[in-house]
Amino acid sequence: DLILLDLHMPRMSGLTLLEHIRDVETREPIIVARAEDSKVAAEALRHGAGAYLLEPFDPRHVETLVATFFDSAKRRESKPNASR
């Protein structure tokens, strides 16, 4: 699973939603979109985003980020549990 979160929403700040998501679910990777500048992007990373997309973004870059997160998750799942 992966969450792609747009920071521009009508009733709530995307950063606020990011905080709420992290309060409930800490494991799911989150990519935030529409981070207008590095200050907003840095704030999103501090709140638990794994990556951010600055506008305008290339759909191929989105595809690469998503594939990277899924590949990383597969590698973590395939590692033997050291406590066994």
Image: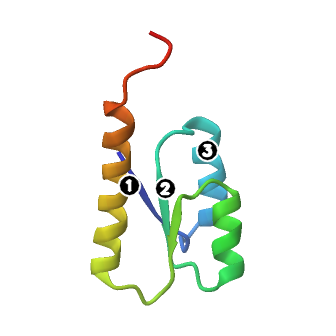
* Residue 52, percent from left and from top: 52, 71
Q: Are marks 1 and 2 in contact (CB under 8 Å)?
A: no
At x 52%, y 65%, the residue is 51
The part of the image, by quadrant, that contains residue 58 is bottom left
Q: Amino acid at mark 2?
A: Ile
Looking at marks 3 and 2 on the same chain, the residue that comes earlier in the sequence is marked by 3
Position of 31 relative to 39 (above/below) = above
Numbered circle sitting on residue 22: 3
At x 34%, y 41%, the residue is 75
Q: Which residue corresponds to mark 2?
A: 30
Looking at marks 3 and 1 on the same chain, the residue that comes earlier in the sequence is marked by 3
Q: Which residue corresponds to mark 1?
A: 69
Circle 2 — which element?
Answer: strand
**Is any part of residue 12 visible from this angle?**
no
Position of 56 relative to 79 (above/below) = below
Q: Amino acid at mark 1?
A: Phe
Circle 3 — which element?
Answer: helix
Q: Are marks 3 and 1 in contact (CB under 8 Å)?
A: no
The reply, left or right, for residue 34 in relation to residue 72 is right
Q: Quote the CA–CA distance across marks 3 and 2.
A: 9 Å
* Residue 74, percent from left and from top: 31, 41
Image quadrant for the C terminus?
top left
Q: Amino acid at mark 3?
A: Arg
